[in-house]
Amino acid sequence: MKNPYGPIQAKIVNIEELSPINKLFTLQIKDNQIRNTFKFKHGQFFILSVPGFGEAPFGFCSSPTIKETFQVSVDKRGSLTSKLFELKKGCEVGIRGPYGNGFDQKKIKNKNLILVAGGCGLSPLRTIIQDANLHPEKFKNIQIFYGCRNPELLAFKKDYNKWNKNIEINLTVDTADETWKNNVGVVTDLLTSEKIKKDCVAILVGPPVMYKFVIQKLVELGLSDEDIYVSLERRMHCGIGICQHCALVNGNYVCTDGPLFSYAEIKDTPEGI
């Protein structure tokens, strides 16, 4: 009987430092057969492990259409991520997944797309951003609204000029430095009736405290509850709906039924957001 918790081995083929606390790891599954059949969708996640240092869920942050490798953005926060920061190109890690329902692209067909991110929340949305740059014919207009603590911690800064070819990027920070030329304030400051396009779907990824205010603003701007999607943060230990750590009171599990939910699905769920 196959062990559902048994990881497969992946090799680190590249490491890029994005900020003082964030690195981008490019991984390649070692087994050719598994690598050739490995697929994920926007919004799905996987469990990454290092022997002796545990495991944790991470969102994919590269286009699903890139087959040979995939990428994950890691913030240095605890023992596992600190160990990952010590690893070098060529080292191996364990992965299992992909898990979660992800985001059905049919929901955004023929609609404009709003991506609202806070802090490290831009990383899982990068699967859509990369996909839109590689395959612009699959998407209509995409707008990014991204807020961070300060300019130094903004994720994927060197990619913004490339993204701007097909995507509108709107940035804000809590605290500016002498080089900052964009908005200073919370991400909701960027969401105005002049900016937001009509007939759109919004996806929110970031700290939970952000969701209440962004959702309220989007509803004021005319979006329906069914067209607002949020990625929920919970302690997803097993990833397969067994450990109960990510259970919601409505009977759903963040790991198997999410992590993306429409606001209509969870707005009446106590502590859903």
Image (tube, grey):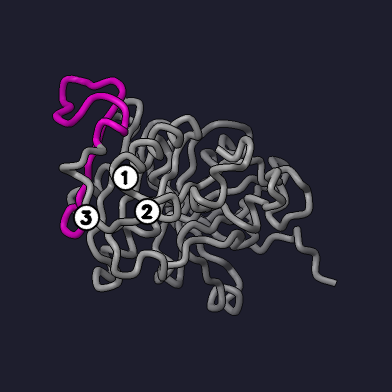
Q: Secondary structure at mark 2?
A: helix
Say what amino acid the circle numbered 3 marks: Ile
Foreground disc of the pair 2, 1: 2
Quadrant in the picture for residue 245: top right
Residue on which disc 1 sits:
156
What residue is rendered at 57% in x and 46% in y?
A: 266
Circle count: 3
* Quadrant including the N terminus: bottom right
Q: CA distance from mark 2 to mark 3?
A: 12 Å
Say what amino acid the circle numbered 1 marks: Phe
Give the camera-side residue of 29 and 252. Answer: 252
* Quadrant including the C terminus: top right
Spot occupied by residue 114 in the image (x, y as percentages of width and height): 31, 51
Foreground disc of the pair 1, 3: 3
Q: Secondary structure at mark 1?
A: loop
Quadrant in the picture for residue 211: top left
Residue 167, numbered label: 3
What residue is rendered at 63% in x and 50% in y?
A: 254
In the rendered view, tell whether residue 206 sits above or below residue 42: above
Residue on which disc 2 sits:
126
Spot occupied by residue 76 in the image (x, y as percentages of width and height): 51, 34
Cβ–Cβ under 8 Å for marks 2 and 1: yes
Say what amino acid the circle numbered 2 marks: Arg
Tell whether position 34 is magenta: no
Residue 112, numbered label: none
Spot occupied by residue 223 in the image (x, y as percentages of width and height): 34, 49
Highlighted range, magenta: 164-190
- The answer, for residue 226, to whether it is visible in the render is yes
